[in-house]
């Protein structure tokens, strides 16, 4: 474990259980050299416990990089709740009770870890967590929080697409720019709306028929299958579904000048960043692009003014311009430049 690439010198990893509520959670704190570790809670049914450990460690490490690059006064951490399968679930299982006992586990960390929403958790779950700890953000507005972070994530993604269009296509606006957009969920659909409003032409895909039908009707989007989207002859590819959509199989088939989207962990491996650079495709590093949501969460936790939050989300565009310029000057992949810029902002610890 200690030498595995996923572990990467985590400061602390806690396994929390509660037989009363069925809680089985892993809380990972990767690095707190910039401040308390903030990262959402993913609630998921994992195939194996090892898969859950690997997931939480990779996500937690990623949050250190995302929070540092976005200049937030935060370290990186994450938690996962291992949901029981329907066969394992006791008849009196209550997600609310489970999240309440997760709140108690988070509180025992004394503020070194702050949670928020992620895949499988919503603002109401944060309220349950808040029953036993104040170290949770992403609270519904009617309870004094800033609510769903995805509109802010989508706005940051839109800024990123603009930066990528300027750098790769020499375009000062998005009129007529063709974007192939994968995933029309909370982030992807809102990003599609921004793009349509700016005059971009959209080709989209999703596994959810309702989302596709809405994009056709409201945004005039063309639709392709989920296995075709990366092959669309377009200007920009925008991944907004799940991770690893840029891999050894898809990269040779891309027909775009740039990639900018909100999904986490878009590159299947680090080598994929080099592959994209070698093909001359400009990659906007995912964690630089999708920081808008965590900026809002951080602002809620520290009580920042909305104007400060807006300014920080707008700064995503300029940060990407810097990444693109440095990558060009150094002849290095943008993914490596982003990692180096992030590592300059926190105390890197390597396992011995
Ligand atoms: P979501 O679940 O609302 O949306 C995901 C969408 O992708 C869904 O519409 C789903 O049907 C679709 N999808 C799933 N598999 C697909 C496939 N194979 N092809 C095409 N579409 C597929 O999630 P979200 O909150 O919009 O997050 C999207 C991505 O952005 C995730 O990778 C998430 O980790 C990342 N992200 C989200 C936020 C946020 O604020 N919500 C912040 C940072 C990063």
Image (cartoon, rainbow, N blue to C red):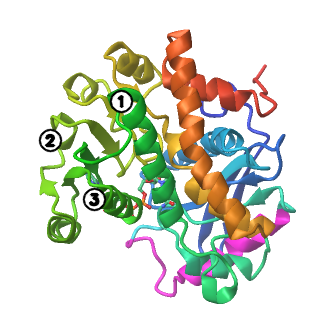
User: Of discs 2 and 1, which sits in the foreground?
Assistant: 1
Question: Where the N terminus falls, by quadrant?
Answer: top right
- Identify residue for label 1: 170
- For label 3, the crowd category at 10 Å Cα-Cα, with few meaning under 14, some 14 to 19 and many 20 or more, is many
- Residue 104 located within the stretch drawn in magenta: yes
- Which residue is at the front of the view, 86 or 151? 151
Judged left or right of residue 217, residue 245 is right
Residue at left 47%, top 40%?
A: 265
Residue 138 sits in quarter: bottom right
Q: Is residue 215 above or below residue 98?
A: above
Q: State which quadrant residue 267 falls in.
A: top left
Tell me: residue 336, above or below residue 305.
above
Q: Which residues are magenta?
A: 86-108
Q: Where residue 15 appears, x then y in whole percent?
A: 70, 55
Query: Are discs 2 and 1 less than 8 Å apart at CB?
Result: no
Q: Secondary structure at mark 2?
A: loop
Predominant secondary structure in magenta? Answer: helix
Measured as percent of width and height from the top left, residue 295 is found at 65, 57
Describe residue 212's horizontal placement relative to residue 318 as left or right: left
Asked if the residue under mark 2 is in contact with the one under mark 3, i.e. CB atoms within 8 Å, the reply is no
Q: Quadrant of ligand 1?
A: bottom left
In three-dimensional space, the C-alpha distance between marks 3 and 1, rounded to whole angstroms, equals 19 Å
| Mark 3 or mark 1: whose residue is earlier in sequence | 1
- Residue position marked by numbered label 3 in the rendering: 196
**In front: mark 3 or mark 2?**
3
Question: Is residue 180 shown in magenta?
Answer: no
Q: Is residue 79 in sight in this rendering?
A: no
10 Å crowding of disc 2: few (<14), some (14-19), many (20+): some
Find residue 228 and name its label.
2
The answer to which of marks 3 and 2 sits earlier in the sequence is: 3
């Amino acid at each position: 474990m200690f030498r595995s690439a996923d572990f990467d010198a985590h400061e602390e990893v806690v396994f929390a259980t509660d037989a009363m509520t069925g809680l089985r959670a892993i809380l990972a704190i990767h690095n707190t050299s910039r401040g308390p570790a903030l990262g959402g809670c993913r609630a998921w049914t994992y195939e194996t416990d090892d898969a859950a450990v690997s997931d939480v460690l990779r996500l937690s490490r990623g949050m250190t990089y995302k929070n540092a690059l976005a200049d937030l006064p935060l370290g990186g951490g994450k938690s996962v709740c291992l949901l029981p399968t329907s066969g394992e679930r006791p008849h009196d299982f209550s997600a609310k009770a489970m999240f309440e006992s997760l709140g108690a586990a988070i509180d025992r960390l004394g503020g070194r870890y702050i949670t928020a929403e992620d895949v499988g958790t919503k603002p109401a779950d944060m309220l349950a967590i808040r029953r036993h700890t104040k170290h949770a953000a992403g609270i519904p507005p009617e309870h004094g929080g800033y609510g769903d972070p995805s509109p802010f994530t989508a706005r940051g993604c839109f800024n990123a697409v603009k930066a990528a269009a300027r750098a790769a296509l020499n375009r000062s606006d998005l009129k007529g720019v063709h974007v192939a957009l994968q995933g029309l969920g909370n982030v992807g659909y809102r990003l599609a709306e921004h793009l349509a409003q700016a005059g971009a032409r959209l080709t989209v895909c999703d596994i959810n028929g309702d989302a596709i039908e809405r994009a056709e009707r409201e945004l005039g989007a063309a639709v392709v299958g989920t296995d075709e989207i990366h092959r669309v002859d377009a200007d920009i590819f925008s991944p907004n579904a799940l991770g690893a959509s840029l891999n050894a199989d898809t990269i040779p088939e891309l027909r775009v000048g740039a990639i900018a989207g909100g999904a986490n962990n878009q590159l299947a491996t680090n080598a994929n960043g080099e592959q994209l650079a070698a093909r001359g495709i400009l990659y906007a590093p995912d964690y630089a692009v999708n920081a808008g949501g965590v900026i809002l969460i951080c602002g809620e936790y520290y009580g920042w003014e909305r104007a400060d939050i807006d300014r920080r989300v707008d700064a995503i565009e300029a940060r990407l311009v810097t990444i693109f310029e440095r990558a060009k000057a150094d002849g290095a992949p943008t993914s490596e430049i982003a990692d180096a810029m992030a590592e300059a902002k926190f105390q890197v610890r390597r396992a011995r």
